[in-house]
Amino acid sequence: MHSALPRLTPRRWIAAVVAALLAVSTAGCTSESEPPEEVEIAAVGDMNGVGTYATDSPSGRNGAAITELVETDEIDAFLGLGDFQYDTAYCEDYVKYWQTLWGGTKSKLYWVSAPNHDWEPGRNEDLDNFMNDQCPGSMGKSAINQERGWIFNGEPYSKDFGNWHIAFLSSAPWRYDIPEAEKLTEWLDEDLAAAKEAGKHLAVVHHEPYFTSNTEAHERAYEHKPWIDVMWKHRVRLTLSGSQHNYERSCPVNNADQCVPDGMTAFQVSTGGIGLRPFTSNPWYISKRFSDTHGFLRLTLRENGSFDWRFVPTSGFGTDVGWRSAPQ
């Protein structure tokens, strides 16, 4: 009796075909080559509204779509860009609402906390407990907690994904503890310097965006400028943030708001499910934006520093597709 063959997802099927072709092409050769490494990522923030657990809600559709990518191994990581559960979230809110719609993403989730909705000292401090499976009724740890153990809401961390190095920073200390935010700036400088020395391509995740259009509720996070200066110093390739309740992508931009070939491509993806907001300004460094569509961002990060992006709409019709070449 033959054993059952393992189920191949489309991604694994393609990898198997590439490997087979390479095996044929290198037969009899003295050295073997491997296909360039690619990292597949999904990212979004500002996810679940107050009391939301309906599967046909914008949040429900996003949660289901990303969960499917996790379960079929189509992505290597899901980057949660903050504001997981509105309005003031405690353990019971994460378990009853966010987990119902998004719990299937947790095994590949790398997260940052945002100020007030995720974490405000002395008010709501349960996000880190939920991500470490310490809330009553929670079901499993996030990916980063599985790897590192308990992570405090404002604690920075970084991780290599293939030939890319991604730093994760909570925006909250700029609101609650300026000396701590300044320490995070020093940490970021040292972390990115070491990764750059090791030959990695660099990305940074933080909730509140610096390169963004204004809305009636938020403007750019001016206080984050020290982080932006450090990112520019080390030539970070891309940044990911949320907060605005819409979608934006910048030109490759430097720390003086100039579009330059070696600048940062700043993605602001806050279309996870919460109500969307119109724009009230039009900065010249924003290349693409819309405020009428819920969905999430797909990124393919390549070994040489090039990357593709595609916004996946789940409620609405806005989209954004593009490619950035490797650094020169």
Image (tube, helix red, strand yellow):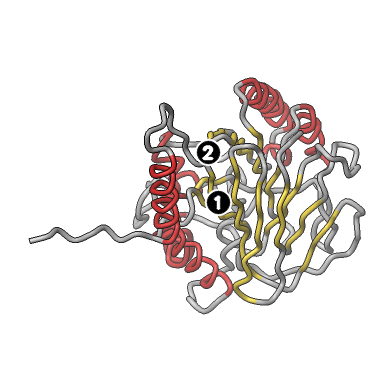
Query: Please, what is the three-letter code of the amino acid marked with disc 1?
Result: Ile
Q: As shown in the figure, which amino acid type bears the numbered disc 2? A: Phe
Query: In which quarter of the view is residue 263 placed?
Result: top right
Secondary structure beneath dot 1 equals strand
Q: Position of residue 88 (x, y in %)?
A: 58, 58
Write the residue at 67% across / 77% down.
Answer: 316
Is residue 51 visible to us here?
A: no
Q: Front-most of 72 and 78?
A: 72
Report whether 326 appears left or right of 26: right
Q: Relative to residue 3, is residue 9 drawn left or right?
A: right
Alpha carbon distance from label 2 to label 1: 10 Å
Image location (x, y in percent) of residue 24: 39, 44
Q: Residue 201's image quarter? A: top right
Report crowding for label 2: few under 14, some 14 to 19, many 20 or more residues within 10 A (C-alpha): some
Label 2 residue SS:
strand
Badge number at residue 41: 1
From the top left corner, tell me how far across and down residue 101 is, in percent.
Answer: 46, 67
Q: Nearer the viewer, residue 101 or 287?
A: 287
The furthest residue to the front: 28
Q: Which residue appears farthest toward the bottom when viewing the image? A: 56
The residue depicted at 72 percent of the width and 71 percent of the height is 318
Q: Position of residue 136 (x, y in %)?
A: 35, 54
In terms of sequence position, does the residue under pointer 2 or pointer 1 come before the other?
1
Question: Which quadrant: the N terminus?
Answer: bottom left
Q: Residues within 10 Å of mark 1 (few under 14, many from 20)?
A: many
Taking 233 as reference, is 21 left or right?
A: left
Left or right: residue 204 versus residue 256 is left
Identify the residue at image location x=47%, y=68%.
64
CB under 8 Å between discs 2 and 1: yes
The residue at which mark 2 appears reads as 161
Name the quarter where the C terminus is drawn. Answer: top right
